[in-house]
Image (cartoon, helix red, strand yellow):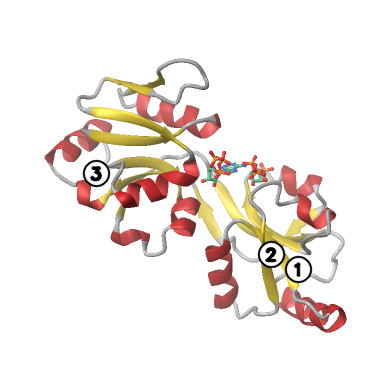
Amino acid sequence: MIRLGVPSKGRLMEQSFDWFADRGVRLSRSGSDRDYAGQVEGAEDVALVLLSAGEIPRELAAGRIELGVTGTDLVREKLPGWASDLIEIAPMGFGHADLILAVPACWRDCRDLDDLTSIARDFRAAHGMRLRIATKYHRLVRAWLSEHEVADYQLVDSQGATEGTVANQTAEAIADITSSGATLRANNLKILSEEPILRSQATLYGNRRAAGPEMDRFLAQLGVAG
Ligand SMILES: Nc1ncnc2c1ncn2[C@@H]1O[C@H](COP(=O)(O)OP(=O)(O)OP(=O)(O)O)[C@@H](O)[C@H]1O
Ligand SMILES: O=P(O)(O)OC[C@H]1O[C@H](OP(=O)(O)OP(=O)(O)O)[C@H](O)[C@@H]1O
């Protein structure tokens, strides 16, 4: 039996269902919107497991599901060394979003990371504390800032509505996912000019240990290589 983990709600769930339907496999919820049991038609020995997108990386690595759909951002953030347990089988062409660093739009002298580095240094001297960056992507943001030799900052945890933390004065800058940019604009934030920390999209992942003829058959049916 192949257990397939798919996000349990929202656009990510609907677009995942469409992606599989285009390949002849019909996924659906068994009952109401609140029912997280799922059904699979058009494929033998495949069970649908509806899960939070954020939990799919962990469930894959633990071997509780053999295949899973989630964002590349969530896999890279939640599973250091992800490639030893997981295989990236196919980018799915939706759920595109960039992980970016943003500062208040009124910081006219802050255009790139060099500017932020000097602002952070001045901020620490003036306030006796490090400039705060709100994010839920702790690992990715730390690694990227360290790569760019930025040190005078602290991360503050924000699990949602991250763009609001600047107006609420719990952070001076944010690192979060953006796609249309509307949330950043609505919160008077601007992106630093660097390339994004990460470009993410919904991706079909497999557990390396689940490789075998049954998996090969299903992936061939989907028209993707394992
Ligand atoms: N505005 C957006 N546009 C496109 N993709 C997005 C957007 N926001 C988030 N995503 C992507 O959707 C995926 C799920 O995001 P997130 O963890 O925020 O889910 P969620 O809906 O809060 O789920 P849950 O609360 O069940 O964990 C991530 O891979 C993320 O990159
Ligand atoms: O660039 P945009 O198109 O405006 O999209 C960006 C927003 O989408 C996501 O939030 P989500 O709606 O998942 O809620 P969250 O605040 O709980 O993360 C993300 O965290 C941003 O807040």
Q: Quadrant of the N terminus?
A: top left
Q: Upstream in the sequence, badge 3 or badge 1? A: 1
Q: CA distance from mark 2 to mark 3?
A: 36 Å
* Residue indicated by mark 3: 225
Q: CA distance from mark 2 to mark 1?
A: 6 Å
Q: Amino acid at mark 1?
A: Arg
- Whether residue 202 is visible here, answered yes or no, is no
Q: Secondary structure at mark 1?
A: loop
- Whether residue 134 is visible here, answered yes or no, is yes
Q: Upstream in the sequence, badge 2 or badge 3? A: 2
Residue that lies at the very extreme toward the left in this rendered image: 213
- In this rendering, the answer to whether 152 lies above or below 82 is below
Q: Amino acid at mark 2?
A: Ser
CB-based contact (under 8 Å), mark 2 and mark 1? yes
* Residue indicated by mark 2: 193
Q: Which residue does the image show at 52% across and 30% down from the upper left?
A: 9
Label 2 CB, ligand 2: below 8 Å? no
Residue 213 as seen in the image, left or right of residue 40: left
Residue toward you, 9 or 93 = 9
Q: Which quadrant of the render holds ligand 2?
A: top right
* Residue indicated by mark 1: 111
CB-based contact (under 8 Å), mark 3 and mark 1? no
Q: Quadrant of residue 18?
A: top left
- In this rendering, the answer to whether 14 lies above or below 117 is above
Residue 166 coordinates in the image, percent (x, y): 80, 57
